[in-house]
């Protein structure tokens, strides 16, 4: 989400005078089993460059460098950078050396996203690791900010009837999702789908209480069962009553 927002703030721009396309930010996802050839192949695909099946790594490297320089890439964004660890030690070193080479040769900045293991992945190259400043995204806690987040999601959920969530339901959402943003969006989105399929057209406290993490496609209607929370988030007595509850009556739902 953060990467997409960053990329959208600096979209490619076409200069009609020079007839050139400027792409200041180039975003990619690290392949599941990274290697030097796969890294350059992914870059060339993003750049829209044709690839010869028998091209060697040196040719792929020069093609990527030439195009990236021509379109004015200034920032290389890499998601799922922890995937580097899926390779052998030798493969990890090669990929890290390649990233450092691209940064040096093109004088571009590298921005990497990943889970906690991303630090270990980047740390495999001391020189490269020194160039990064680390920022950690904390998980959501039982506070007013979390309530505001859920309210914002519900406000943009196109259900015909208002949804009323009690503090207990908010705590359950936090417990099940473990405070991870993507999980929160996923859970509420699937609750909304279930609400439409059932004809209720609203997310109820009962639906939240009976929620299980399996996707809707793996559940038959009406077969929901209670699931034990997967985390202790929100069980601290000092934080269990910090929710004031969310009433979506103050939001007018958008009709499809």
Image: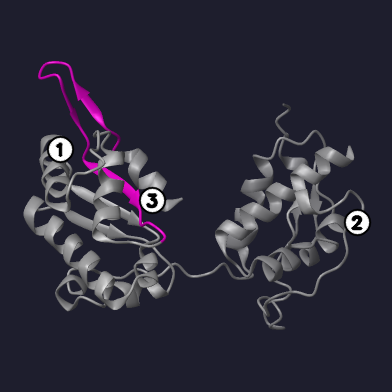
Was residue 19 drawn as part of the magenta stretch in this picture? yes
Are there few (<14), some (14-19), or many (20+) residues within 10 Å of tag 2?
few
Left or right: residue 242 compared with residue 167: left
Q: Quadrant of residue 212?
A: bottom right
- Given this view, does label 1 or label 2 mark the residue nearer the observer? 1
To which residue does mark 2 refer? 223
Which residue is situated farthest in the front direction here? 54
**Image x and y of residue 21, in percent:** 19, 27
Tell me which residue sits at (72%, 49%) in the image: 190
Q: Quadrant of residue 38?
A: bottom left
**Image x and y of residue 15, in percent:** 17, 22
* Quarter of the image that includes the C terminus: top right
For marks 2 and 3, the one nearer the N-term is 3
- Given this view, does label 3 or label 1 mark the residue nearer the observer? 1
Q: CA distance from mark 2 to mark 3?
A: 37 Å
Q: CA distance from mark 3 to mark 1?
A: 22 Å
Q: CA distance from mark 1 to mark 2?
A: 54 Å
Picture colour scheme: one colour
Q: Visible in this render: residue 200?
A: no
Using the image, determine if residue 2 lies above or below residue 130. above
Tell me which residue sits at (32%, 55%) in the image: 78
**Magenta-tinted stretch:** 10-32
Closest to the observer, 27 or 174: 27
Tell me which residue sits at (65%, 76%) in the image: 233
Q: Visible in this render: residue 53?
A: yes
Mark 1 lies on a secondary structure that is helix
Residue 67: which numbered mark, if any? Answer: 1
To which residue does mark 3 refer? 3
Q: Quadrant of residue 48?
A: top left
Tell me which residue sits at (73%, 34%) in the image: 253
Are there few (<14), some (14-19), or many (20+) residues within 10 Å of tag 1?
some
């Amino acid at each position: 989400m953060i990467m997409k927002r960053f990329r959208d703030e600096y979209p490619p721009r076409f200069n009609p005078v020079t007839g050139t396309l400027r792409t200041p930010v180039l975003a990619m996802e690290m392949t599941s089993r990274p290697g030097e050839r796969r890294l350059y192949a992914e870059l060339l695909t993003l750049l829209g460059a044709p690839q010869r099946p028998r091209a060697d790594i040196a040719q792929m490297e020069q093609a990527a460098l030439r195009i990236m320089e021509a379109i004015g890439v200034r920032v290389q964004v890499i998601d799922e950078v922890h995937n580097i660890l899926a390779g052998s030690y030798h493969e990890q070193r090669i990929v890290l050396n390649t990233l450092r080479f691209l940064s040096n040769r093109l004088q571009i900045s590298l921005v990497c996203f990943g889970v906690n293991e991303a630090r270990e992945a980047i740390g495999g190259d001391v020189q490269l690791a020194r160039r990064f400043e680390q920022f950690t995204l904390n998980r959501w806690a039982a506070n007013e900010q979390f309530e505001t987040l859920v309210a914002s999601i519900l406000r943009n959920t196109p259900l015909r009837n208002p949804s009323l969530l009690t503090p207990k339901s908010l705590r359950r959402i936090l417990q099940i999702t473990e405070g991870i943003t993507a999980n929160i969006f996923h859970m509420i989105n699937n609750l909304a789908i279930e609400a439409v399929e059932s004809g209720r057209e609203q997310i109820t406290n009962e639906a939240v209480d009976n929620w299980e993490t399996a996707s809707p496609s793996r559940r038959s209607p009406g077969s929901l069962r209670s699931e034990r929370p997967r985390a202790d988030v929100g069980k601290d007595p000092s934080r269990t009553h910090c929710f004031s509850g969310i009433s979506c009556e103050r939001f007018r739902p958008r009709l499809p």
